Amino acid sequence: MATTTSRLLQLLSLLQARRDWPGSVLAERLAISHRTVRRDVDRLRELGYRIHATKGPDGGYRLDAGSELPPLLFDDDQAVALAVALQTATGSGAGIGEAALRALTTVRQVMPSRLRHRLDSVEFTTVPGRSGDATPDAVSTDVLIALSAATRAHEVLRFDYATNPGAAGVDAVSPRRAEPHHLVTAQGRWYLVAWDLDRADWRLFRADRIVPRTPNGPRFTPREVPGGDVASFVSARFKGSVSADRWPCVGKVILGLAAAQVLPFAGDGVVEDLGSDRCLLETGSWSWVALAASLNRFDADIEVLGPPNSPTRSRGWHPATPPRRNVTAAESGSRRRRAAPAAVSGARPPCQRQRQRQRPPCQRRRRRRRQSCRVRPSSVTRVAKTPRVAAPPAVPPLRR
């Protein structure tokens, strides 16, 4: 028979799992009488839990929110999930790192040894930054534990990696061998920072595409991540840079928009208000084409300040050229109302003349030769028809 303490914990767990519980169902689940259920509910109320009771034959119990947070009961999976979430929150950059670390220490102290060992097997680094636009794919807990265990043991990881999942008719799975160094989470996804033995270079593998193989390979000597900081290394790879945690292409422009309109879409760029609906934007991208595309989305006047020799100046963004501006409806209507030039008889439209000039010389010669040999209706000499003259009437012979 269960003791009073264990029965109270079971009752608390049931009340947390569901909003409303009929008294008869609780008595059946706990194998006790209705009177014992009422007594256990009163004991929980004395401990600080606000439990609302409904009278009647269909009455039951409900765990309401209280003014203070009472002790909670978690199962094994919930405890591990809570600890992983607290460890992720320490590097989220939301200003709750210290509180999350204290809460993680408290949860870890009261964990059983089996759960503490399971939690310690998942070691990872959180890379701060904004969330990604793509929907994160679920990663199995067993995969994270296997990756973290191989990282802590310094063992070569053998796994199947889906390089192009979802492609029809393509073998998307390829076997890999890598030396795992760090397990990181960034932009809502899990990544494995490892040294690829087949390609002899550092790689970022998405954990949701990894299928570990058993057993692991031999032990290896850990290498130093480029730059010495795994968070900076991962952030630099996301930006397309190899050496440092910065964008390869950085530009500074003046936009003809207010700073309040640009700031929500500036990302990690720096926005400075210049007043009178103008602002200074310094941002970067992995290529000059991508940088030009990101600036064009503002659809405003653009004045390039730097860098001096950037390829964006050769693409039409030069201070000497007038900035692009929006065309108002009145201007658009006045342009449509302009009279079209009179058409010249026998002249080709501009589009046809342009296509004629773009043809190779050999094609133009053949075209002129065909035109010269062609007989035009206007050049045919028409012969006037001779009018028919009516024959004179026959003269009857003379009769003698």
Image (tube, grey):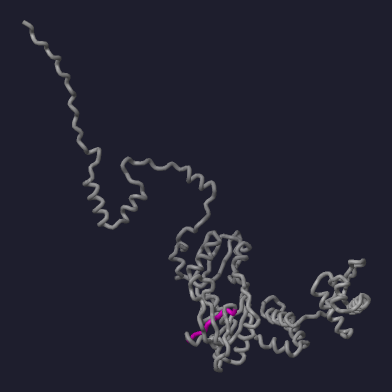
Whether residue 44 appears in magenta in the rendering, the answer is no
Picture layout, residue 6 above or below residue 61: below
Q: Residue 217's spot in the image, x, y percent? A: 55, 91
Instruction: Looking at the picture, tell me which residue is in the foreground, 338 or 218.
Output: 218
**Chief secondary structure of the magenta span?**
strand
Q: Residue 9's spot in the image, x, y percent? A: 84, 81
Q: Which residues are magenta?
A: 200-207
Instruction: Looking at the picture, tell me which residue is in the foreground, 176 or 86.
Output: 176
Quadrant into which the C terminus falls: top left
- Residue lying farthest front? 400
Q: Residue 48's spot in the image, x, y percent? A: 88, 77
Answer left or right for 260 relative to 102.
left
Q: Quadrant of residue 381?
A: top left
Tell how many labels.
0
Q: Residue 72's spot in the image, x, y percent? A: 81, 79
Answer left or right for 146 relative to 335.
right
Picture layout, residue 395 above or below residue 169: above
Q: Residue at x 57, y 80 (%)?
A: 210
Picture layout, residue 399 above or below residue 368: above
Q: Quadrant of residue 392?
A: top left
